[in-house]
Amino acid sequence: MKKAWRLEVGIIIQVLKVLFNSNLGYMTADSMERHGPGITFFYDNSKYEGEYDHDEQSGEGKFWSRQGDYYEGYFLKGKKHGKGLRVQINGFIYDGEY
């Protein structure tokens, strides 16, 4: 009975992930982690398009915030890292290292 209960909870968690963070990309078969290129639309209307490594934004990518700000560059473990370009809707532009 415990095994069936864990399976149901796992399915519910995966459904919630899809509802709140829809991902179009590659996932590893055994762990359901995003890996490789993909696009994620977040519930707050922000969007990430780029590389994933073990379910984290890593490598080259682009991120659009819900306010309309934009970042294009490198990510490491879900954070901006290395060279990148940030453009804000108020006109601020930063092109440099993170």
Image (cartoon, rainbow, N blue to C red):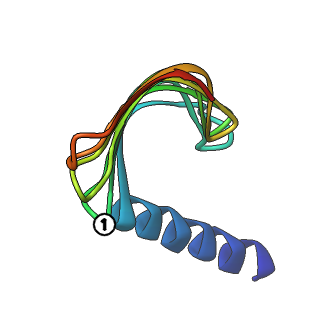
**Front residue of 43 and 25:** 43
Q: Quadrant of the N terminus?
A: bottom right
Q: Circle 1 sits on which residue?
A: 44
Vertical comparison of 95 with 67: above or below: above
Few, some or many residues within 10 Å of mark 1 (<14, 14–19, 20+): few
Q: Residue lying farthest right?
A: 2
Q: Position of residue 26 (x, y in %)?
A: 46, 27
81 lies above or below 9: above
Q: Is residue 53 above or below residue 82?
A: below
Q: Give the secondary structure at mark 1.
A: loop
Residue name at image x 20 percent, y 47 percent: 89
Name the quadrant containing residue 28: top right
Q: Residue at x 67, y 38 (%)?
A: 30
The C terminus, quarter of image: top right
* Residue 7, placed above or below residue 59: below
Amino acid under disc 1: Asp
| Residue toward you, 65 or 92 | 92
Residue 31 occupies quadrant = top right
Q: Is residue 23 left or right of residue 1?
A: left
Residue 39 position in % (x across, y down): 34, 34
Q: Provide residue 53's location: percent of width, then percent of height.
A: 64, 28
Q: Quadrant of residue 24?
A: top left
Query: Which of 96/29 is in front?
Result: 96
Residue 23 visible: yes
**Residue 72 seen in render:** no
Give the total number of marks visible in the rendering: 1
